[in-house]
Amino acid sequence: MEKHTRLARLAVGFGGLGVFGIVASVAIALAGAAASASYAISPLNYTMSELGNYGHSPLAVVLNGGLFFGSLCLVLFCLYSMPLTKSVSGALCYLSMAFACFTLAGIGLFPLNVYHLHIIMLKWFFILGSLSALFYLVNLALGFQQVFKTWSWFPAGLALVGQSSFLLLPLFKLGLTDGDRPFYHEMVLEGGRPDVWLPACIEWFSFSVFILWILTLLIDKYYCLRRQLR
């Protein structure tokens, strides 16, 4: 019990630090870009990749630093959470999530200026994020979740839909991008910028619901820890 309590404390501590660092850096960088641009900037028409582009985004270093260090904290959150699971599907969820967070740190380490490495990290972030959400839903279906069992389907389902839609929508040949190229190849918009740009919307939605889902897992660990300390 003492070992589980120690692991839960470390998971909650690193998870909280990671979520706060990522959300704060994104908010600061987005506000800085919107304040300095001559046109309207919002998550509806400006990708997170552009926000971390050195030379084009004034606070790119804030975003990239927050993504890198915050995501590494989330990797530790996942690794400390793995021994607390009671199933193979739960362990696979946290393992794939740890790799997804590692690639998210890679997105910060290799911004859009390092185009090819950035695209690789971006692609694998969405692949591994989709897998982690899928394993979590399997874990829920098998009845291994302890806290928030009745409603945690929702954030996990949103994460799966968001992450997988970023990868799969271009495959349907709907003309959403030039030549129906994958979204991760369409992270920079040249020329005029519309008020709503679909690749940017889907990237932000996918990223946001993934962080929201991790936040619910963090709250889950916090309540489990409180129960252990009673």
Image (cartoon, rainbow, N blue to C red):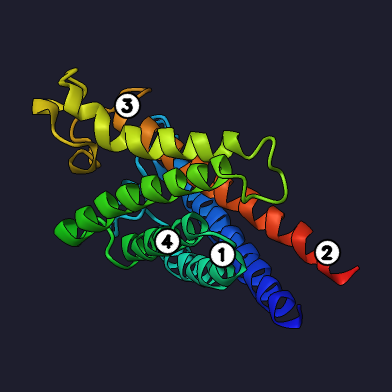
Neighbours of disc 1 within 10 Å: few (<14), some (14-19), many (20+) = many
Q: Pointer 2 and pointer 1: residues touching (CB < 8 Å)? A: no
At mark 1, the secondary structure is helix
Identify the residue under disc 4: 101
Identify the residue under disc 3: 198
Q: Earlier in the sequence, mark 4 or mark 3?
A: 4
At mark 2, the secondary structure is helix
Q: Nearer the viewer, mark 2 or mark 1?
A: 2
Q: Earlier in the sequence, mark 2 or mark 3?
A: 3
Image quadrant containing the C terminus: bottom right
Check the image and report above or below for 208 versus 120: above
- The single residue placed furthest to the top in the displayed view is 174
Q: Nearer the viewer, mark 4 or mark 1?
A: 4
The residue depicted at 83 percent of the width and 64 percent of the height is 226
Question: Which three-letter amino acid code belongs to the residue tagged 2?
Answer: Arg
Q: Quadrant of residue 227?
A: bottom right
Measured Cα–Cα span from mark 2 to mark 1: 20 Å
Q: Earlier in the sequence, mark 4 or mark 2?
A: 4
Measured Cα–Cα span from mark 4 to mark 3: 24 Å
Identify the residue under disc 2: 226
Question: Which three-letter amino acid code belongs to the residue tagged 3?
Answer: Leu
Question: Which three-letter amino acid code belongs to the residue tagged 1?
Answer: Gly
Q: Pointer 4 and pointer 1: residues touching (CB < 8 Å)? A: yes
> Mark number for residue 105?
none
Neighbours of disc 2 within 10 Å: few (<14), some (14-19), many (20+) = few
> Mark number for residue 18?
1
Q: Earlier in the sequence, mark 1 or mark 3?
A: 1
